[in-house]
Amino acid sequence: MNSTPATSPDTDWMRDSFINVQEQLRLSLMQAQLSIAHPGTQGDVTEGHWIDVLRAYLPKRYEVASGLVIDSTGGRSHQIDVVIFDKHFTPTLLDQQNHRYIPAEAVYAVFEAKPDIDKSYLTYAGEKAASVRRLIRTSVAIAHAGGTYPPKPLFPIVAGILAPKASWSDGLGKSFRDNLPSAADEQLDCGCALDAGAFDVFDGSLNIVSSRGSLMYFLFRLLAKLQSLGSVPAIDWGAYASIVANVGGGANPSTLSSAPGP
């Protein structure tokens, strides 16, 4: 009896579609650089294109926006181009138009969106990452039917850089590796340069892939990393309430406590 030969999976159509998404983004970023003369406006449009792509592929539990990250002590980060943060449990604060203040407890990842990846932009992105990672994050117990879950340990906030290209002739080669920030709070965990490739350190060492299909590779690796982080910690709203507790003769901050819950 003749056996039917096994057929190999047909993934060509999917790979080609993924590559087409990358080409569309590359053309949009190029159009912004060619047609918009004002640097600030060009930067806003560039950030917007990256934000749109991330919103399209991340689950709806995540929100993606630009803004400042803040903490319950009044600390503020630098302005961050792209922030991935919790949409379900944690509201943004003091929003005005598209300007957002995002509680540090809600943040999963931060990115800088730049015209290219070079030494100065790597340093700049590292400094931006550090301004977020140095903020205070609270975590409180969560009530459930049988009692309470203990406060969730804080996970490291992911940081990275996004650009249409890299400035070095060898792309994400030796010069790129030599110029990655070395300080722990400035570490860049991942990134994508559409014409040069994508990188991440999610497995404990630097992993770099070539430019073809690098956008979707970056997105899928980021999705896996976000999935591994689980939910954000339950924020201690009492810590934020204490900021205004004494305004107009309010309660003593020492008497405030946060009810268990997200």
Image: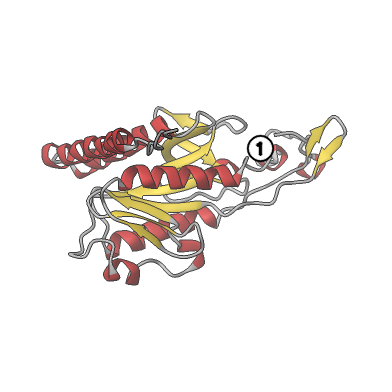
**Residue found at x 43% / y 40%:** 67
Instruction: Name which quarter of the figure residue 83 lies in.
Output: top left
Residue 227 seen anywhere in this rendered image of the structure: yes
Measured as percent of width and height from the top left, residue 219 is found at: 40, 43
Question: Is 190 drawn above or below residue 222 in the view shown?
Answer: below
**Residue found at x 61% / y 52%:** 155
Residue furthest right in the image: 146
Quadrant in which the C terminus appears:
top right
Measured as percent of width and height from the top left, residue 149 is found at: 79, 41
**SS for callout 1:** loop
**Mark 1 belongs to which amino acid?**
Val
| Residue 169 or residue 159, whichever sits in front | 169
Residue furthest front in the image: 1
Q: Is residue 241 left or right of residue 107?
A: right
**Residue found at x 45% / y 47%:** 221
Measured as percent of width and height from the top left, residue 252 is found at: 78, 41
| Residue 2 or residue 246, whichever sits in front | 2
Q: Is residue 103 left or right of residue 82?
A: right
Q: Which residue is mark 1?
A: 244
Q: How busy is the neighbourhood of tag 1: few (under 14 within 10 Å), some, or many (20 plus)?
A: few
Question: Is 130 drawn above or below residue 102 in the view shown?
Answer: below
Measured as percent of width and height from the top left, residue 229 is found at: 59, 46
